C-alpha cells in the first residue's frame, strides 16, 4: 500500500485536474449555448430557402444554373469538419472513422481532401493523404469574415470546373448529448424530382383543404429567381453545416468533460477512503504501542 | 386583418411583426402587399421596406438585395443585410 504522503500527493493532483475539467465543462457549456442559438437561427433561414427552392422548382421544369450542373469527369472533393482542439471525447474519432470508410468505398474515383479543423488534417496527412486545402484557424468560433471566404473558394473551384462534386462530412447536431456524423452532398445542388413532386402534392393537398390557389407569381421570372436563390442557398447551407459541426463539437466536449469530472470525483472518493484508512491504522498502531508500553511499565 | 411580416438575414431572424400593409423594393419596382395577396416570389433590390403595424404606426428598414415570398398572409424576406431606418431623422434631413 502507498504511503500516506504519496496518497496525499495523488489526491491533490486529482483535485487539480478535476477543477480544470470542471472549468472546461462550463466553458464548453456556454459556447454550446451560444452556437446553438446561432444554429437554430441558421436552420430557420435554411428552412425558408428549402421551401422556396421547392416552390420555384415545382413551378417551372426547365431551370438551369451552373451550380447544379453535374459533371462526369474531374475529382470529387470531401470536406471534413473536425475540431481544432482535442479533449472532446469520441467526436473526432467518429468523424475520422466515417471518413476512412467513405474513402475506402470511393477509392476508385480520385477524391481531393479539404479539412476544416486541425484534428482531421493531422490524422490524414500523417497517414499519407494529401490535403488540398486545410483551414485550421477557426477554433470552433463562427465568424462570417473567416468562414464565408472558405465557402466562396470552394464554390469557385466547382464553378471553374476543377471539381466535379463537393461533399461535406460533418456531425449533425441533434441534442446536447446526441450528434450524428453525416455525409451530405453540397454541390452540384441536387433536388430529386420525386421529392419535388411529393412536396407540391403535399402543398396542394394542404391548400385544397383551405381552398387557396396554387399558382405563384414570379417576379421577374422563375429563372431569375432561381439564379438569385441558388448561391444564397449554397452559402446558407455551408453556414448551417459549419454551425452544426461547431455545436456538436462543443456539446461533445461538454459531455466528455462532464464525464471526466465525475470520474475524478470517484477516484477522489476512493483515494480519500484509502488515506483515512491508513491514517486510522497508524493512529491505532500508536495507541496500542502506548498502551502496551504503559502495561509493561506497570509490571 | 393582419399579415405576419418576417425579415431574415443569413444570420437568422431579424424581426417578426404583425402588419396591415407592406411596401417592399422589388426588382421591377416597389410593390405593396395587403392581406390576401396572391402567392408571390420576387427578388428584392436595395431599398427601403416600410410597413404599417396594427396600431397604425409606420416603420421602415433599409434592405440590401434579397428575396421575398408572400404566401397565405405570411410575408417573408431574406436579405443580405438590414439596417434600421430612422424615419424622423431622414425626413427632417430631406426637407430642409
Image: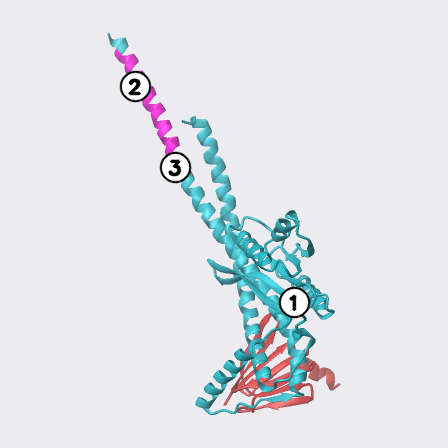
Chain colours: A cyan, B red
List the residue tagged with mark 1: A165
Q: Quadrant of the N terminus of chain A?
A: top left
Q: How many residues crowd mark 1 within 10 Å: few (<14), some (14–19), many (20+)? A: many
Image quadrant where residue A294 sits: top left
Q: Is residue A228 above or below residue A207?
A: above
Residue located 49% across and 50% down the image: A256
Residue under mark 1: which chain is it in? A
Is the residue marked by circle 3 packed among few (<14), some (14-19), or many (20+) residues within 10 Å? few
Mark pair 1, 2: CA separation: 82 Å
**Measured from the top left, where is residue A12 in percent x and y?**
48, 35
Q: Position of residue A143 (x, y in %)?
A: 64, 62
Q: Is the residue under label 3 in contact with that under label 2 (CB below 8 Å)?
A: no
Q: Is residue A281 magenta?
A: yes
Distance Cα–Cα, label 3 vs label 1: 55 Å
- Judge by depth and name the residue closer to the eye, A58 or A10: A58
Of residues B76 and A153, the one drawn nearer to the viewer in this rendering: A153
Label 3 lies in what chain?
A
Q: Are marks 1 and 2 in contact (CB under 8 Å)?
A: no
Residues tagged by mark 1 and mark 2 found on one chain of the structure: yes
Residue A176 location (% of width, % of height)? 47, 59
Nearer the observer, disc 1 or disc 2? 1
Is residue A43 among what the camera can see? yes
Instruction: Read off the residue under disc 2.
Output: A288
Q: Bounds of the magenta span?
A: A268-295
Which residue in the protein does label 3 denote? A270
Amino acid at each position: 500500500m502507498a504511503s500516506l504522503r504519496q496518497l496525499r500527493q495523488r489526491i491533490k493532483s486529482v483535485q487539480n485536474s478535476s477543477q480544470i475539467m470542471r472549468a472546461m465543462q462550463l466553458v464548453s457549456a456556454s459556447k454550446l449555448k451560444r452556437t446553438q442559438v446561432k444554429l437554430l437561427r441558421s436552420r430557420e433561414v435554411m428552412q425558408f430557402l428549402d421551401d422556396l427552392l421547392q416552390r420555384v422548382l415545382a413551378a417551372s421544369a426547365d431551370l438551369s444554373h451552373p451550380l447544379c450542373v453535374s459533371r462526369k469527369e474531374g475529382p470529387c472533393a470531401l470536406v471534413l469538419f473536425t475540431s481544432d482542439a482535442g479533449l472532446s471525447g469520441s467526436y473526432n474519432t467518429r468523424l475520422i472513422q466515417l471518413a476512412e470508410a467513405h474513402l475506402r468505398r470511393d477509392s476508385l474515383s480520385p477524391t481531393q481532401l479539404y479539412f476544416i479543423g486541425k484534428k482531421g488534417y493531422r490524422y490524414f496527412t500523417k497517414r499519407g493523404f494529401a490535403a488540398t486545402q486545410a483551414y485550421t484557424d477557426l477554433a470552433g468560433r463562427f465568424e462570417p469574415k473567416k468562414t464565408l471566404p472558405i465557402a466562396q473558394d470552394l464554390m469557385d473551384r466547382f464553378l471553374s470546373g476543377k471539381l466535379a462534386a463537393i461533399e461535406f462530412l460533418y456531425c449533425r447536431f441533434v441534442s446536447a448529448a446526441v450528434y450524428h456524423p453525416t455525409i451530405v452532398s453540397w454541390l452540384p445542388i441536387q433536388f430529386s424530382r420525386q421529392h419535388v413532386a411529393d412536396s407540391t402534392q403535399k402543398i396542394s393537398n394542404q391548400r385544397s383543404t383551405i381552398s387557396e390557389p396554387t399558382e405563384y407569381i414570379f417576379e421577374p421570372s422563375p429563372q431569375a429567381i432561381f439564379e438569385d436563390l441558388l448561391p444564397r442557398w449554397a452559402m446558407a447551407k455551408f453556414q448551417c453545416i459549419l454551425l452544426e459541426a461547431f455545436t456538436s463539437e462543443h456539446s461533445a466536449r461538454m459531455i466528455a468533460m462532464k464525464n471526466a469530472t465525475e470520474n475524478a470525483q470517484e477516484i477522489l472518493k476512493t483515494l480519500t477512503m484509502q488515506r483515512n484508512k491508513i491514517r486510522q491504522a497508524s493512529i491505532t498502531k500508536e495507541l496500542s504501542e502506548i498502551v502496551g508500553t504503559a502495561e509493561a511499565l506497570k509490571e | 386583418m393582419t399579415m405576419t411580416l418576417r425579415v431574415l438575414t443569413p444570420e437568422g431572424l431579424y424581426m417578426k411583426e404583425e402588419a396591415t400593409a407592406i411596401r417592399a423594393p422589388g426588382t421591377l419596382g416597389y410593390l405593396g402587399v395587403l392581406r390576401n395577396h396572391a402567392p408571390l416570389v420576387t427578388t428584392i433590390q436595395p431599398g427601403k421596406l416600410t410597413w404599417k403595424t396594427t396600431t397604425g404606426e409606420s416603420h421602415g428598414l433599409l434592405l440590401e438585395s434579397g428575396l421575398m415570398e408572400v404566401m397565405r398572409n405570411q410575408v417573408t424576406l431574406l436579405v443580405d443585410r438590414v439596417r434600421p431606418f430612422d424615419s424622423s431623422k431622414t425626413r427632417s434631413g430631406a426637407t430642409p
